[in-house]
């Protein structure tokens, strides 16, 4: 096992990794910007190193600064968390060149899965169901029109290096395709430095389902089941749950078996998430893979009792899955996670500032992952996530009831949060009945209160 790990992240995920390190007897090193000097991940790590000013490009995304901190602290490995440098193949390659273990897949696999049209081709080759679409990048408006005619409208243009809904446009007619192609290309180039697009059939009113996997460095891969992530606004998830009410045990096993074989063949290892769209006939289609731990990983942990972050550390240290898991994956009950953001619950505008009161809920089946605290400050430079509230119940009805209770006991003052929005979602009859898709939030917000 590693002796010392640098956590190349901030906030609740940095604290989550530090907790896993403490339980495994590993010393942890936090990095922080000047804005995060008083953060809890700095306080609870065994060592902490300031790597720059508040701006991301000058601190958490500054690869030379992160590597310098790792070398100064003489660490064995780096855990990147999620976001930031977690899916940066160049960063993983620099770690490798500096003889520092990157806790994640290899640079080559990160690159493969990061370029969406290549990931799509790799999945198709090994039998993972995918949507009809272009064979790789569409290099011009004319080529996009040709593919759209083959695939049939509506289609969706996507950035090959995209994420978070950027560089993405839905096209319903041929007349609007050229303008939308140019808009998607321009947005992709601005956001990712790469304007390449690919095209696939657009699924109307889909559900967003993702599968969690763990893979060791000995060719063994296991699926830990799915998460339902359809409650989202502008492609940003607000609430996740497991299991999905629409995934049958047979479908869960079928997709899990296909993914295990596929990822073993492509040489994947560590934690990963494969995202699918589900159409109205409950058919799943691959859309992308995230080569890192997910924000919503606690949902899977709650229903499987598998600590995914400790599993990551053990796998990176060379352990086999049989030693990490020590038995088959067993799913128990139902779990829900609400992402509590520092945002106005209706306007969705960021709400940075000082937290004057912070009273997280507790009780049976309740977990909260956060780095927030009373008198702590939410800086304006970073993601708005301040806490993840997770519950588990014996079934979905109990999980909904427990989450509603916990949200009602969660007090945050001094800033706006999305807690009121989550409480409204949990009370909605359509949500409670499991009748929703990725368009739920838009319809929900349009309802009269």
Image (cartoon, rainbow, N blue to C red):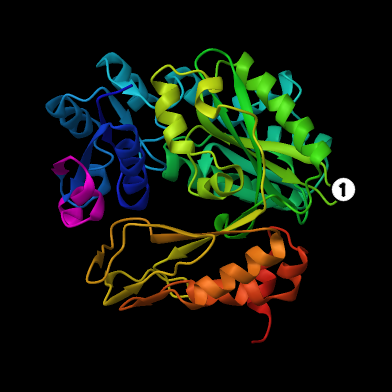
User: Residue at the location (43% across, 37% down)?
Assistant: 309
Viewport quadrant of the C terminus: bottom right
Q: Where is residue 218 shown, x and y percent of the image?
A: 53, 12
Q: Where is residue 208 shown, x and y percent of the image?
A: 68, 49
SS for tag 1? loop
* Residue 221: quadrant of the picture: top right
Q: Is residue 295 left or right of residue 241?
A: left
Q: Is residue 372 left or right of residue 206?
A: left
Report the span colored magenta: 34-51
* Residue 387: quadrant of the picture: bottom left
- Please identify the residue farthest to the bottom as the structure is shown: 449
Magenta includes 40?
yes
Q: Is residue 395 left or right of residue 8?
A: right
Q: Where is residue 2 shown, x and y percent of the image?
A: 30, 23
Q: Where is residue 175 shown, x and y percent of the image?
A: 74, 51
- For disc 1, the marked residue is 281
Return the residue nearer the eye: 288 or 188. 288
Q: Does 236 sit above or below residue 409?
A: above
Residue 135 visible in this rendered orientation of the protein: no
Magenta includes 45?
yes
* Residue 237: quadrant of the picture: bottom right
Viewport quadrant of the N terminus: top left
User: Residue at the location (34% across, 38% down)?
Assistant: 23
Q: Is residue 374 left or right of residue 290?
A: left
């Amino acid at each position: 096992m590693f002796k010392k790990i640098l956590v190349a992240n901030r906030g609740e995920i940095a604290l989550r990794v530090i907790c896993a390190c403490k339980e495994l007897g590993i010393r942890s090193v936090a990095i922080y910007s000047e804005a995060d000097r008083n953060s809890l991940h700095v306080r609870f790590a065994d060592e902490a190193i300031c790597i720059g000013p508040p701006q991301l490009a000058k601190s958490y995304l500054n690869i030379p600064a992160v590597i310098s901190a790792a070398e100064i602290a003489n660490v064995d490995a780096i855990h990147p968390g999620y976001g930031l440098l977690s899916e940066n193949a160049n960063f993983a390659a620099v770690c490798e060149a500096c003889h520092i273990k990157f806790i994640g897949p290899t640079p080559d696999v990160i690159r493969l899965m990061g370029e969406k049209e290549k990931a799509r081709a790799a999945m198709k080759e090994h039998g993972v169901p995918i949507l009809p679409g272009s064979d790789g990048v569409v290099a011009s408006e004319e080529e996009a029109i040709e593919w759209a005619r083959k695939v049939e409208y509506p289609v969706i243009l996507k950035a090959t290096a995209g994420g978070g809904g950027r560089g993405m446009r839905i096209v319903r007619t041929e007349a609007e395709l050229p303008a939308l192609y140019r808009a998607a290309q321009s947005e992709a180039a601005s956001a990712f430095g790469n304007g390449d697009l690919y095209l696939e059939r657009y699924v109307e009113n889909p559900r967003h389902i993702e599968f969690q996997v763990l893979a060791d460095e000995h060719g063994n891969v296991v699926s830990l089941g799915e998460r339902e992530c359809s409650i989202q606004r502008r492609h940003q998830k607000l609430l996740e749950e497991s299991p999905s009410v629409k995934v049958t045990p047979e479908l869960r096993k079928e997709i899990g078996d296909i993914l295990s074989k596929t990822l073993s063949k492509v040489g994947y290892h560590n934690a990963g998430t494969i995202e699918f769209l589900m159409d109205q006939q409950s058919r799943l289609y691959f859309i992308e893979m995230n080569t890192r731990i997910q924000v919503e990983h606690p949902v899977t942990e709650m229903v499987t009792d598998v600590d995914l972050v400790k599993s990551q550390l053990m796998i990176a240290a060379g352990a086999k899955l049989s030693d990490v898991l020590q038995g088959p994956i067993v799913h128990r009950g139902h779990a829900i996670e609400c992402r509590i953001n520092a945002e106005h619950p209706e306007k969705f505008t960021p709400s940075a500032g000082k937290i004057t009161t912070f009273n997280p809920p507790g009780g049976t089946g309740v977990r909260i992952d956060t780095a927030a605290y009373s008198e702590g400050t939410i800086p304006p430079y970073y993601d708005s996530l301040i806490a993840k509230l997770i519950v588990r119940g014996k079934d979905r009805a109990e999980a909904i009831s427990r989450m509603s209770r916990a949200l009602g006991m969660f007090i945050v003052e001094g800033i706006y949060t999305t807690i009121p929005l989550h409480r409204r979602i949990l009370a909605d009859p359509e949500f409670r009945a499991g009748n929703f898709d990725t368009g739920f939030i838009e319809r929900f917000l349009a309802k009269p209160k």
